[in-house]
Amino acid sequence: MAAEGLFNRPVCVQVRCQGCEERRLNVRVNIELLSISNPVHKKDLAVRLTDDSDPFFLYNLVISEEDFQSLKSQQGLLVDFSAFPQKFIDLLQQCVQEQSKDVPRFLLQLVSSASVLDHTPVFLNVVETNPFKHLTHLSLKFLPGNDVEIKKFLASCLKRLTEEKTVLEEKLRKNEEDLTRQLSYAQQSLSEKSRELDKLKSEWTSHTAALTNRHTQELTNEKERALQAQAQYQQQHEQQKKELENLHQRSVQQLQNRLSELEIINKDLTERRYKGDSTVRELKAKLSGLEDECQRAKQEVLSLQRENATLDAECHEKEKLVNQLQTRVAVLEQEIKDKDQLVMRTKEVLDATQEQKVILEESTETKQGHIEKLETTIKSLSAELLKANEIIKKLQGDLKTLMSKLKLKNTVTIQQEKLLAEKEERLQKEQRELQEMGQSLRMKEQEVGKLQEQLEATLQKLEESKQILKTNENVITWLNKQLNEIQMAKKLETSASAQGGVRTAAVPPHGTPDPPAFPSSATAYPFSPLCAFQTFPESARNLFAPSVVPKVALLFLQVQFSKMNRCSDLQTVTTSHPANKENGGALGLDSKYLKKKDDSIPLRGLSQNTLNTEYPKLNLPAKAQPSPRAAATPASAYFPG
């Protein structure tokens, strides 16, 4: 027997018991389709009602195809058994959608004939409420579960809960493992970042100290320059002051001469002014008289203009009358001519009419009888015309009403056209705004693409820098190993010479002292090549031989010699050498390589940037100097790891 789950969720149900108040209860409805193939293949619909808060609340209903036929005939259902489960689920979903409303349209009722829901059959009704009545779409009878069914149900619930518990425990375990991994990874990354931060802080402090020293020197230089410029400017100012005083005296003399000339000119101008004032007074008196005359003339002009306007109007009217009279005279003359012609014609017609009169008198007698007949027909036609006029009046009234309706329709259509035009304008504006938004969105997408490309480029650079750091660390470890091996070899040689008893202060034939004896505890510490190079130049030459150290190692050792501040506690011991005394040179390295520098970096902390800078060359023999081709060889060629 196979079971297919169709519906399983809690639904709010209205419980009605006999003699009790209505109450609401959350009931879980479980619908399953049971297919039985032994001995005959058939399908049953199983519906179960349970309460999550009450494990002993259990009602079952099993509907076979035969039971469904009786249910269909009893309740007037229109669906088959195959479509009944889906329709029942649709009704339950509508009840779930309406259960949150105050007045739900669809609701579920659980009706019991007993006073309490206790081992008695109940009816589950799907009810639709409308303003007229409550319509029951479906009513199903559920039987209470017995002890065996309740035990089976509780066992299935317990099994399901245990399965869910195991699944949740597995998920929790996986989540804990993932979180612990993430935590460990985060702690590692945090420790790495803290180390990088410490390195950056140390570099920054050294950089700031160098910058402060440089800026202080620049400030002192600038102050000296400013003082020199101030002294120069003061000298120039004094010279300019003297020149300006001489120019001022010359200009004062010129101005005094000009002032005497101007005073003479001023006297002449004052005399002319007095004469001009007298002439101005006379002209003002004349002007006042002329202004009075001008005002009078203006008033006369205004009065004449008014009279002229009235005369123009009268003249215009009289011209109109003259034109009218002339046209009338022409018309009268034409009428007289026409009347003369008419008189002539009438005379001719009179003669003809007199001739016709005789003929007409004869025809009138015949036509009078015909006229009497026509009068009778005219009377009948006039009655019909009256009826037709009434019909025409009615039609005119209908036409007026239709015209008024048409006017209303025209006004409505005009308003609608205006509204349509406004809506079209709004639509165009919205389309423009939409296009602008699309353009802005494209711009944003382009910016996002550019930012992503920049991010990818920075990530690639970061990976390259990590690879470079790894190669640098490999090179440094290799160099330390080489130095330790050289130290061990030298130590073995010194121990062998000590056992042979050869310890003299004499100089060997090559002109260099023997290498010093190393303490036995030196194997536990890395050997610094600086001590050997500064004290024993021959050992330094042997170290730089091409057979001992590769060309890349020479590069790094040159960097180490140029950065001497980390070994500030090392004392340089210079021994007397006959050959070097004759040449006048210092033993080992030059004195400029033994000066302390603030920006020095130890051998273990070399970065890729220090490799690209130019380093000072060591005072080495010709055979130990690295060739340019060897210096250009990258470190990855010797250390692929």
Image (cartoon, helix red, strand yellow):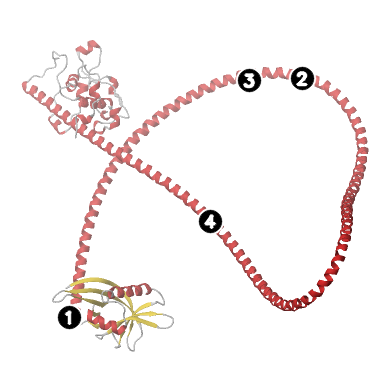
Left or right, 612 with reference to 273 = left
Query: In terms of sequence position, does the residue under pointer 2 or pointer 1 come before the other?
Result: 1
Left or right, 57 with reference to 497 = right
Q: Which dot marks residue 241? A: 3
Quote the CA–CA distance across marks 1 and 3: 126 Å
- Answer above or below: position of 375 versus 265: below
Query: In terms of sequence position, does the residue under pointer 1 or pointer 3 come before the other?
Result: 1
Residue wearing tag 1: 148
Residue wearing tag 2: 256
Q: Residue at x 27, y 45 (%)?
A: 189
Badge 1 element: helix
- Answer above or below: position of 627 versus 412: above
Query: In terms of sequence position, does the residue under pointer 1 or pointer 4 come before the other?
Result: 1
Badge 3 element: helix
Q: Disc 4 residue type?
A: Glu
Give yes or no for contact between labels 1 and 3 (Cβ–Cβ under 8 Å): no
Q: Where's residue 531, x and y in %?
A: 21, 25
Viewer-closest of 106 and 570 = 106
Query: In terms of sequence position, does the residue under pointer 2 or pointer 4 come before the other?
Result: 2
Q: Residues within 10 Å of mark 2 (few under 14, many from 20)?
A: few
Quote the CA–CA distance across marks 1 and 4: 74 Å
Q: Quadrant of the C terminus?
A: top left
Disc 2 versus disc 4: nearer the observer: 4
Residue 140, can we see it? Answer: no
Q: Where's residue 76, x and y in %?
A: 32, 82
Q: Where's residue 164, x and y in %?
A: 21, 66
